[in-house]
Amino acid sequence: MQQYRTGDSLIFKVQERVIHMPAADLYPDNAGVADSADACQPIPLSIHSWVVRTPDDVIVIDTGTGNDRERGNNPLFHQLKTPFLENFLASGIQPEEVTLVLMTHLHTDHVGWNTVWRDDRWVPLFPNARYICSEKELIRAKNSDRYRNLWLDSLLPVIDAGQLETIDVATQPVFGGRLRYTPTPGHSPDHAALILSSGGEYGFFAGDIAHSPLQFSHPEWHSVFCGDPRLAEESRRRAMAWCEEHQALWFSAHFAGSSCGWLHREHGRYSWSEAEGIDDK
């Protein structure tokens, strides 16, 4: 399993699946003006979790879509049968070892494996973990008909188990002594990225700030999934500048391949290079 290191923390990806979307569907307002041949090709989108192992904690960042979910017959998310749990167990970590689950936002492809169907009910997959999310995002999900099924199968069971804690992301709380929430609104109203600070090195868990590396050279592009395109672009540009300045490893929520890498800026334009792992076993 490919691993990455930031200070004393080891990070690896747990794959759920990869889908493909035409650029014109993913970026309907922008892809037609692309100056890159890559924009004419279907864009691979990975759905996965990141696991951060520190000396004290096992931390899961976002939890994918989940299996067996009723999602209004949307083929992207509806009644899936993916090997996510098998892939997670192949890491050698048991769900009982996870101490924190940190959510960047509460869209269906980021919270599904919060729970599993067991004994005729939804129960937390990580029985000993504290689950953390934005209070504003939770209220929005609770009060929205659109998110009714997500609320019932991926959030309420964690609340009933007494494991969900809400935060104000604007206060930039720190968890595990190393991971700090930072507000990055736009994709969703209270979307927040996570900054890993360890041993003078940085990792940036970007959530849905960007859906493909094309947005580094075209930061004005916004995905079809973004609620507020203007705010999303502002958050993206701030995040890109911060990561370049701090030489932070960017851990994406949806890039294919390694799903993480480095930002480089030359002549005012950003480019992307994938990171090489430290281990492949």
Image: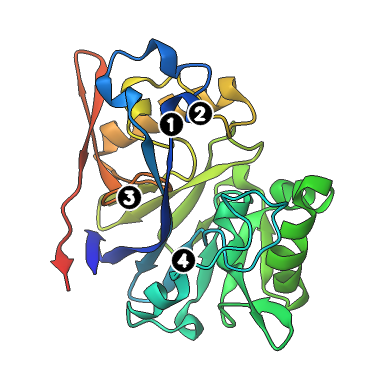
Q: Nearer the viewer, mark 3 or mark 1?
A: 1
Element under label 3? strand
Residue at the disc numbered 2 = 25
The three-letter code of the residue at mark 4 reads Val
Mark toward the start of the polypeptide (4 vs 3): 4
Choose between 68 and 64: the one closer to the eye. Answer: 68
Do the residues bearing badges 2 and 1 touch, measured as CB atoms within 8 Å?
Answer: yes
Do the residues bearing badges 4 and 3 touch, measured as CB atoms within 8 Å?
Answer: no
Find the distance from the CA under tag 4 to the CA under tag 1: 30 Å
Q: Position of residue 37 (x, y in %)?
A: 26, 20
Q: Position of residue 173 (x, y in %)?
A: 55, 53
Is residue 224 shown left or right of residue 94?
Answer: right
Find the distance from the CA under tag 2 to the CA under tag 4: 30 Å
Find the distance from the CA under tag 2 to the CA under tag 1: 5 Å
Residue at the disc numbered 1 = 22
Find the distance from the CA under tag 3 to the CA under tag 1: 29 Å
Find the distance from the CA under tag 2 to the CA under tag 3: 30 Å
Mark toward the start of the polypeptide (2 vs 3): 2
* Vertical side of 178 occupied by 104: above or below: above
Residue at the disc numbered 4 = 60
Residue at the disc numbered 3 = 203
- Total numbered labels: 4
Element under label 4? strand
The three-letter code of the residue at mark 3 reads Gly
Whether residue 115 is visible, yes or no, is yes
Is residue 114 shown left or right of residue 70?
Answer: left
Find the distance from the CA under tag 4 to the CA under tag 3: 14 Å
